[in-house]
Amino acid sequence: MLNLIQLVILLSFLVFDTLLMIAVASGFGVVFLVITQMVSASIGFYQLKTKRLNFNTLLFVDTERKKGIKIVRELWEECLMIAGVILLLFPGILSDILGYLLMFPRTRERINQFLI
């Protein structure tokens, strides 16, 4: 369950992402925005299909983390990859940028250093 701080951060992200999409659409045009969103969603679906990601991993990691059990690096890697795919599937410029960054192993390694 989301607490108040997480909810505020999530809503702020969504509002900022929507405002950024409006700015891009007004600057480059709606066609450009639609094409970029379709390309990002296609890449997300492709990653989802080829990587054979298991969304149950997110539930497993959350349960183990709440129990206080240390999560191994590989599980965090898969969770970050799933998060990247989810961000690519959602419309938005900022979510696409974050999704693309999570597709790179180097970015995931840096985030893993913070998580572990």
Image (cartoon, helix red, strand yellow):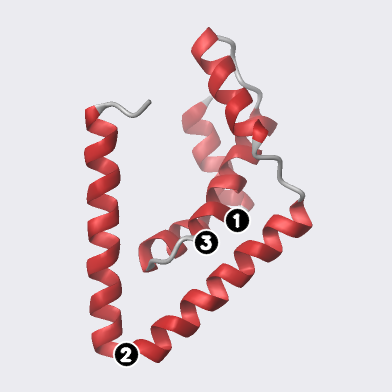
**Circle 1: residue type:** Phe
Q: Residue at x 52, y 61 (%)?
A: 88
Whether 73 is drawn above or below 39: the answer is: above
> In front of the other: label 1 or label 3?
3
Q: Name the residue: 53% across, 77% down.
A: 38
- Mark 2 or mark 3, which has the lower sequence index? 2
Residue 52 or residue 116, whichever sits in front: 52
Q: Is disc 1 in contact with disc 2, using a CB cutoff of under 8 Å?
A: no
How busy is the neighbourhood of tag 3: few (under 14 within 10 Å), some, or many (20 plus)?
many
Q: Spatial distance from mark 2 to mark 3, Cα to Cα?
A: 20 Å
Mark 2: amino acid: Phe
Q: Decide if residue 29 is on the left or right side of residue 103.
A: left
Circle number at residue 88: 3
Q: Name the residue rendered at 53%, 61% in the picture.
A: 89
| Label 2 sits on residue | 28
Query: Residue 42: x percent and y percent?
Result: 62, 71
> SS class of the residue under badge 3?
helix
Q: Amino acid at mark 3?
A: Leu
Q: Looking at the rendering, which quadrant does residue 55 occupy?
A: top right
Q: Secondary structure at mark 1?
A: loop
Q: Which residue is mark 1?
A: 104
